[in-house]
Amino acid sequence: MNQQLIQQLEDICSSRGIRLTPQRRRVFELICENKKASSAYELLEQLKVSEPQAKPPTVYRALDFLLEQGFIHRVESTNSFVSCCSFGEQKHFSHLLICDKCGNVVELQDDILIALLNNNVDKYGFQFSNHVIESHGICQTCSSLEEQDK
């Protein structure tokens, strides 16, 4: 696990006056270590390796905390979780590219798209808390593998 990222997580929590419990930290580490989006059940199974007594509420509380603080995103369409590239920003726009074959998720931050979305939000006086656009398809790697199989 990237120690610099964990230090940044700890620093942000400290500056916000919030507590980073060992379980919250471990769930975040697991999400970051996984190549694809992780379900709560998958995270629970991974957490049980180091904490055999872990129960679903432990994971759900950690996920709620990490979501609220802007450290992770929920992939609504697959009911799973990924780390956030705008680490710690509690309110921001994200565009997720989700591969339907391998499950990998890429988060994009496009300034032009964000400006258009902000325009729409402002135009209607909408107060947003989180905005994620999900695009499903096949990633370049899986697409290349399909071509090789033909």
Image (cartoon, helix red, strand yellow):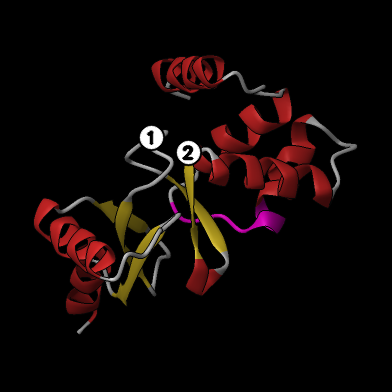
Q: Which residue is mark 1?
A: 87
Q: Residues within 10 Å of mark 1 (few under 14, many from 20)?
A: some
Residue type, label 2: Phe
Give residue 66's position: percent from left, percent from top: 57, 40
The secondary element bearing badge 1 is classed as: loop
**Up-down relation of residue 18 to residue 33 (above or below):** above
Residue range corresponding to the magenta coloring: 36-42
Q: In the orientation shown, which residue stands out farthest toward the left?
A: 112
Numbered disc 2: secondary structure: loop
**Residue neighbourhood size for the residue with mark 2, other residues' Cα within 10 Å, grouped as few (<14), some (14–19), many (≥20):** many
User: In the displayed structure, would residue 137 be above or below residue 140?
Assistant: below
Residue 80 lies, with reference to residue 22, above or below; the image says below
Callout 2 touching callout 1 (CB < 8 Å): yes
Q: Is residue 50 left or right of residue 144?
A: right
Give the x, y percent position of residue 15: 50, 15
Which residue sits furthest bottom? 150
State which tag comes first along the sequence, 2 or 1: 2
Q: Residue at x 47, y 41 (%)?
A: 70
Instruction: Please indicate whether residue 80 sits to the left or right of residue 36 in the image.
Output: right
Question: Where does residue 107 sit, x and y in percent of width and height?
Answer: 30, 53
Q: How far is the residue under mark 2 from the one under mark 1?
A: 5 Å
Is residue 12 shown above or below 109? above
**Depth check, front residue: 119 or 63:** 119
- With 111 as the anchor, is 86 left or right in this view? right
Q: Quadrant of the image for the C terminus?
A: bottom left
Of residue 129 and residue 27, the one placed in the foreground of this image is 129
Residue occupying the point 15% across, 64% down: 116
Instruction: Identify residue type, mark 1.
Output: Phe
Task: Please give the label number shown on residue 71.
Answer: 2
